[in-house]
Amino acid sequence: MAARTHTGMRGIAAVPSYVVMQPTTLCNLDCAYCYLPMRAADRRMPVAVAEAVAASVNPWAAAGRFSVVWHGGEPLAAGREHLAALLAPFGPEVEHHIQTNATLIDDAWCAFFAEHGIRVSVSVDGPRERNAERVTRGGRPAYDRILAGVAALRRHGVAFSALAVVSRPAPGLATELYDYFLDLGCDVLGVNIEETEGVNTRTNARDPAAVTAFWAELVGAWRRDPRIHLREVEWSLRYAGAVLAGAADDLLPRRLDPIPTVAHDGSVVVLSPELAGFTDPRYGDFSSGNVLATPLAEILVDAGRTLWVGEFLAGVEACRSSCPYFGFCGGGHAANRYFELGRFDGTETEHCRNSKIRLLEGVLEHARDHESPAA
Ligand code: SF4
């Protein structure tokens, strides 16, 4: 795997494939690993911000598939009436997604999701005892409320994805989690190893062998019953297949997706939603502009000139020339570099070791361990 042969991910695309919107900074939970700095305050996005974003997004959606991802805070904490007002400026071609802790989902929310064609993704870390980090503002376990929300989704036949955070990979955990999510009824599952970012300063350095073994075990569990689209494993297998076919360079996009996050006040942070709401003496508030002053489409054309973004692009080039995993990873995430390394132009982070390098090694380990004896 010669890192220099990969030609994708050069510069930032002017048109994203999706936009992340923050309808409110507020979250009704207070999870121990949460990175969000303003989750105790209810700062709601004015409708004027949604109108300004829709002015750029609607033509993009008319030209091809396009999504808006409503992310918080807890987006349902904005309330149905306000969320409906924020959705209204977007045209019928726009796909809407919500990332939610599920605790507020009831029959009325399920009707709302159906009415607006919203795809739901639920944050839940597995069985009750695996959700100790997910607690209410009063410090009480949120698990029963999460399950009540999921039960409402199932009652109404609303398809949903799930997103799980794994803090401490250990033998047996991957199988336990996969079986749990099969029972839960989600159709897509994403698995994140806990990250050190934002106001979560806990270390994410993990035993390399334990993380690799976790991913290998997860592949095994999935292969026994692959009813769920398992995000990380499917990415890895797609990459491995492309390498075997000699087409690995076709997988990475030609340019980085800017993934603009539009904060409650209209400010736009590209590449890493996790940087929104933070400030730094050198980089200011990380934003590349505000949709109330400049159209989103124009902000993105110039996003590469934002100081930290230029440094991040230099880091991507450093990854390209030094890392054998670049063709799979594409250069990692800006927020992980910043919160782990204090800069954007570095390369390896604990996050990329846990979630890219060891993921791919885990998939290969599984393949080695299950090789046909006749092969
Ligand atoms: S972020 Fe990490 S895994 Fe990704 S290309 Fe850079 S060094 Fe490699």
Image (cartoon, rainbow, N blue to C red):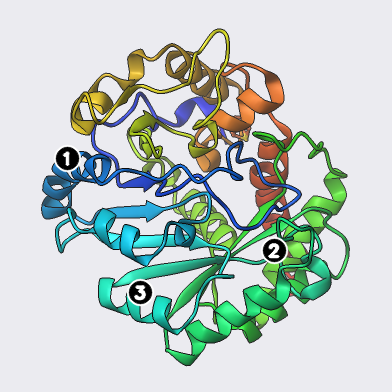
Amino acid marked by disc 3: Phe
Q: Secondary structure at mark 1?
A: helix
Q: CA distance from mark 2 to mark 1?
A: 45 Å
Q: Secondary structure at mark 2?
A: helix
Amino acid marked by disc 2: Ala
Taking the spot 54% from the left edge, 82% from the top edge, the residue there is 227
Please report contact status of discs 2 and 3: CB closer than 8 Å, yes or no: no
Q: Secondary structure at mark 3?
A: helix
Q: Upstream in the sequence, badge 2 or badge 1?
A: 1
Query: In the rendered image of this protein, does residue 18 appear above or below residue 112?
Result: above
Q: Residue furthest bottom?
A: 155
Label 1 belongs to which residue? 56
Density class for disc 1 (Cα within 10 Å; few <14, some 14-19, many ≥20) is some
Left or right relative to 222: residue 279: left
* Quarter of the figure with residue 104: bottom right
Label 3 belongs to which residue? 113
Query: In the rendered image of this protein, does residue 250 appear above or below residue 99?
Result: above
Q: Upstream in the sequence, badge 3 or badge 1?
A: 1
Ligand 1 closer than 8 Å to label 3 CB: no
Left or right relative to 158: residue 237: right
- The quadrant of the rendered image in which ligand 1 is seen is top right
Res. 367 mark:
2
Q: Quadrant of the C terminus?
A: bottom right
Density class for disc 3 (Cα within 10 Å; few <14, some 14-19, many ≥20) is many
